[in-house]
Image (spheres, rainbow, N blue to C red):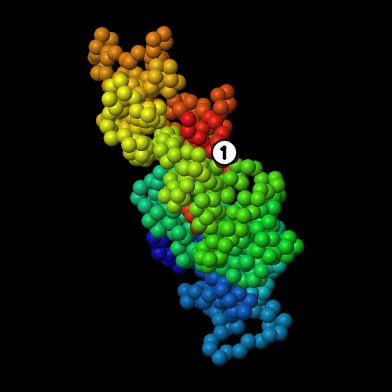
Amino acid sequence: MRFPSPSSPFIGRDEHLRILAADGRAARETGSRTTFVHGEAGVGKTRLLEEHLRRAPYAMTALGGCAEAGADGLPFAPFSTALRALVREGGSGADLGRLLPEPGEGTSGTDEGRARLFEAVLTFLEERSRPDGLTLVLEDLHRADASTLDLLSFLVRDLGPAPVHLIVSVRTDDLHRTHRLRRSLPELERLPRVTRLDVEPFSREEVDAQATALRGTRLSATDLDLLWRRSGGNPLFVESLVGGGDPAGAPLPDGPRDLLLSTVDPLPEATRRVLGLAATAGTRVPHTLLAEVARRVGVDEEELETALRPAVDARVLRALDDGYAFRHALLAEAVHADLLPGERVRLHRRYAEALGQGLARMAERERAVRLAHHAHAAHDQPLALEAAWRAVGHVAAVDAYPEQLDLLERVLELWESVPDAAERLGRSRADVLTLAAEVCLVAGSPRRAVDYADGGLAELGVTGLHEKGRPPTEAERISRLRHARALALKDLGLDGALEELVEATGLLPYDHPDRIPVLSTLAATLDGARPPSAGRGNRPTLPSPGPGGARPAQRGGLPRHPRLGDGPTRAGRRLGPARRGRRPGQGDRRGTDRDPGPGEPRRRAPEPGAVGGERRGDLGGAAPMP
């Protein structure tokens, strides 16, 4: 049998191919072998088997698949398909009439007739396997009827010295607690000539290779991280998301979504309702939070646990020490997207109510971030504004730069919708724009830093350079915006950084603490702009640091904007411990505790990072401005 070249590239799986090839050689040399290939839907079991068969040197191969109808379908369906193909290629199927019936032909139902049928199949496979070997592939055993399982069990035990390599694929996520294979499969896999091969999801590097092969160009590190998390390393989902044009934020196409929901549809109505409740929280949900929200929609804790049991048995959910997690992140997205719009808003509102009351054994940072998400999804704009600002301070404490920037952008997005936003936060819009510009620098988004700095200057009414001797009222704020703008321009390789730095320096009093970092950046800029052959005598004179102060130490270059996972950099040190969300003396800390809810895929990496304020404000630690 010949196989067409696939349209998608084959990535990785070298060890899996090696094991399959070794089992095939052993079958030809020493007798029959059986390999059970396990993996979740879409993980690439069929693609792996196609690649193996293309490389295998066998003279004879045949494939059969179990029909969707399962036990209600035609008995022996996968064997009938495979044996029919072998007969067409020259075998004699005279004794297989009951497996390959002509229309209108009847079958005998006695045990003796069944035994003769099994022997006929065994004899036929032995004959067709000689002299060069035979590979027989049966796909989707999880759908097999009882008769197919009986025949398979017979062949695995009795093929003996025949050079037959049986390869059987099994979808593990369909093996619910009462599935017949949960009992019979382990018995077969303990036999001496049987191998179990587990096909795991792709690693981050393999997802990178697959996405690059499909797109022709590599994704950014941020988009790759989000694609890997959303897809769970499942090649089918990677291909679907990449094909959507926006790998990091595209909604899941109908085909993969229907595949995911096929495990949910057969569950009881009460279970599906609770799954919608759980999916509203995201991929993972603590039991205490789920129980509190369930109580608010009229489901007590005993009813909740009864409804959750079928979902855990069907492997839709995994029970954790403190809650539950969906088997796959995209499954949570699919269940959430399947809710009606009104349902989604109501459930998010219930979550916001529960989180607003406070929950035992939930960290304040997690509560703040979850509340910000649910209030926004519930369209409660005043609460969403305040919750997002609180969360800014909490994520700042763990250097969650992209997360903090997302939250600041949400505050700015909601600002015009909340008339008393400044009174609620105790901060002006210019304060938020200034902080956003500074966070963009350490989050590696210099172009956006320029935009936010320009917005902040416009908010303060700044249209040009200030007049000498007449510092503006908001001199300190303007200096910070000028400094952030200069750093961003320098990072982008654009002109104007030097003028911005001179302006930022002139706005500050001699004894202002921000003057030293601005002067340090100015010195580094002048040093970088000087031609290599210029002597020290040609060096421009730096502004004086003050009447009695020493000239600030020069740094070896402009700050480098860190990527997620980098250690402390000069960009972080430039902002100082207070601006990075830490009080002086605190060490560097990192963490990842945000699990964004479904339905709102983010383009930024979910790993948090931030810049915060020195003083605590009225809203639970949001990064305030001086």
Residue 168: quarter of image: bottom right
Q: Which amino acid does label 1 sit on?
A: Asp
Count of numbered badges drawn on the protein = 1
Question: Would residue 25 be seen by someone viewing this image from the given angle?
Answer: no
- Where is 537 relative to 104, above or below? above
340 and 101: which one is in front? Answer: 340
The single residue placed furthest to the bottom in the displayed view is 104
- Where is 496 relative to 315, above or below? above
Residue 347 x, y percent position in the rendering: 59, 61
Q: In this view, does 292 lie to the left or right of 84?
A: right
Q: Which image quarter holds the N terminus?
A: bottom left
The single residue placed furthest to the right in the displayed view is 302
Residue at 44% of width from left, 36% of height from top? Answer: 431
352 and 489: which one is in front? Answer: 352
Residue 303: quarter of image: bottom right
Q: In this view, does 122 lie to the left or right of 46?
A: right
Residue matched to label 1: 618
Residue 324 x, y percent position in the rendering: 66, 54
123 and 542: which one is in front? Answer: 542
Residue at 40% of width from left, 27% of height from top? Answer: 476
Residue at 43% of width from left, 56% of height from top? Answer: 250
Question: Would residue 463 be seen by someone viewing this image from the given angle?
Answer: yes
- For label 1, the crowd category at 10 Å Cα-Cα, with few meaning under 14, some 14 to 19 and many 20 or more, is few
Residue 455 x, y percent position in the rendering: 35, 40
- Where is 14 relative to 555, above or below? below
Residue at 68% of width from left, 80% of height from top? Answer: 114
Residue 512: quarter of image: top left
Circle 1 — which element? Answer: loop
